[in-house]
Amino acid sequence: MGRDYNVYGIGNALVDIQYQVDPGFLNEAEIDKGVMTLIEEDRHLKLIDRLGDQVLKRSSGGSAANTMIGVANLGGRPYYACKVAKDEYGDFYLQDLEAAGVESNPVNREEGTTGKCLVFITPDADRTMNTFLGITSTFGPAQLEEEVIARSNYLYIEGYLVASDTGFEAALSAQKMGKRWGARVAITLSDPIIVDVFKSRLQELVENGVDLLFCNEDEAKAFTDQEDAEKACASLKDQVKGYAVTCGPKGAVVFDRDESVESPGFMVEAVDTNGAGDMFAGAYLFGMTNGYDVTQSARLATYSSAQVVSQFGPRLEESLKDRIPEILSQ
């Protein structure tokens, strides 16, 4: 589509620290299973001390960052605007992001503590997240680069941003910039709890004009106040120009203006669902910005997200760039 970047993403910069735990640990530590919970630094440090050296893996993360890495994995050109501190974890974050093929602005750093997300993976492949936002809680309009947005096909807004005043302000400002320069605006609802608590802010973004909305079935139902996923999708058609609703192992339902497609899932042995939705969004955005139609883009997305589910961690270690024709032929 003739611009320097396929996608310009904005969101929280978090170092993901992954642990394998059993449900008993979650109960004993009084952690709500299967959702994202914001925690303060003292709680974060106590949990790390309790878990000791059981770290499975650490990586640059945050929902939108994982999506940008997904774009890069398929050979796309993503850019990620974020905020990390001038500390060891901030150094690690930017180096790891660059190694994954994602450009960013390294000057968006201040004194403070880089955010971290403790990801607890249970034997049922479910993921539970406890997040200490750190310095990313102050991500705001100052971290945006309008000249880069102007050179991007899509603007991608992480829904978690609306949980803070500065993050919401940044989302609104970026949306205006994207529309000013003709970038299509995409947003993810991120989590059912975010929808429940900050629905009015998400609705404001949608009312301002959204070309593509990403969510899962639970988020779609929460946002539209529908108890049925099919009715929720019908409601979304009246609110956004396009959407992609993921349906777990069943695949996804996507809609782009007048075209609606049901894309079946790929059968895999689920190990860890962390990052599946993020990867879906990244692969779909890659397809939609690299000459693939809605059906092909959805196929790339369902396949890519299934591969993430079949391994530990929110990103794929091996690039799918050279396998695209094979994936589309399956």
Image (cartoon, rainbow, N blue to C red):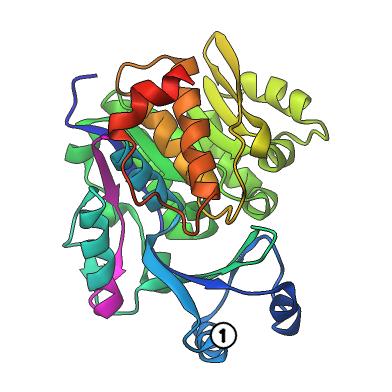
Farthest right residue? 227
Residue 99 in the figure: left or right of residue 268: left
Residue at the spot 75% in from the left edge and 30% down from the top edge: 229
State the residue in front, 63 or 81.
63
> Mark 1 falls on what kind of element?
helix
Q: Is residue 162 above or below residue 225?
A: below
Asked whether residue 320 appears in the rendered view, the answer is yes
**Could you say where residue 12 lies in the image, as x and y percent from the top left?**
41, 59
Q: Is residue 293 above or below residue 272?
A: above
**Could you say where residue 304 lies in the image, as x and y percent from the top left?**
46, 37
Residue 79 drawn in magenta:
yes
Label 1 sits on what residue type? Leu
Magenta part of the chain: 75-90
State the residue in front, 203 or 5.
5
Residue at the spot 55% in from the left edge and 90% down from the top edge: 46
**Could you say where residue 127 lies in the image, as x and y percent from the top left?**
61, 61
Quarter in which the N terminus is drawn = top left
State the residue in front, 156 or 71.
71
Query: Mark 1 = which residue?
Result: 47
State the residue in front, 93 or 168.
93
Residue at the spot 62% in from the left edge and 47% down from the top edge: 269
Residue 204 drawn in magenta:
no
